[in-house]
Amino acid sequence: MIALAGIVVRNSIILIDFIERIRIRPDTTLTQALIEAGAIRLRPIFLTAGAAMFGALVIILDPIFFRIGLEFYLRNLCFNIVFFVGDSSGVFFD
């Protein structure tokens, strides 16, 4: 859960930092700063979250964990499903 919060918070902090850097320029409104920062930072945010979601998805769908033990498999499956859903919703509601 710490990794999930770390990814979402890091992306938010970087996006807010970009907005503030753009707002320093003269004759820049908040709307213009939001649009420009979103255009610059949206791709890296999606790539970071996508890599984390892909890593969780690989573990969710990997049948080799089932051979290790059912309890271990179910514990990791539940954690990775929560991580996958939390990361995807964190990106889209960020």
Image (spheres, rainbow, N blue to C red):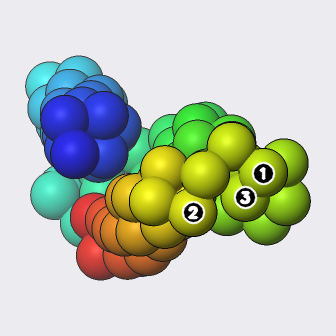
Q: CA distance from mark 3 to mark 1?
A: 4 Å
Residue carrying label 2: 70
Q: Amino acid at mark 1?
A: Arg
Are the two marked residues, 3 and 1, in contact with CB atoms closer than 8 angstroms? yes
Residue carrying label 1: 67
Q: Foreground: 66 or 3?
A: 66
Q: Quadrant of the N terminus?
A: top left
Q: Secondary structure at mark 2?
A: helix
Residue carrying label 3: 66
Q: Foreground: 7 or 84?
A: 84
Q: Position of residue 62 (x, y in %)?
A: 82, 56
For residue 23, above or below residue 21: below
Q: Position of residue 45 (x, y in %)?
A: 52, 44
The answer to whether residue 27 is left or right of residue 45 is left
Quick one: label 2, few (<14), some, or many (20+) residues within 10 Å? Answer: few
Q: CA distance from mark 3 to mark 2?
A: 6 Å
The answer to whether residue 71 is left or right of residue 21 is right
Q: Secondary structure at mark 3?
A: helix
Q: Secondary structure at mark 1?
A: helix
Q: Foreground: 68 or 48?
A: 68
Q: Foreground: 42 or 65?
A: 65
Q: Amino acid at mark 3?
A: Phe
Are the two marked residues, 3 and 2, in contact with CB atoms closer than 8 angstroms? yes
Residue at 78% from the left image edge and 51% from the top image edge:
67
Q: Quadrant of the C terminus?
A: bottom left
Q: Amino acid at mark 2?
A: Leu
For residue 1, above or below residue 86: above
Quick one: label 3, few (<14), some, or many (20+) residues within 10 Å? Answer: few
Work out whether residue 34 can be spotted. yes
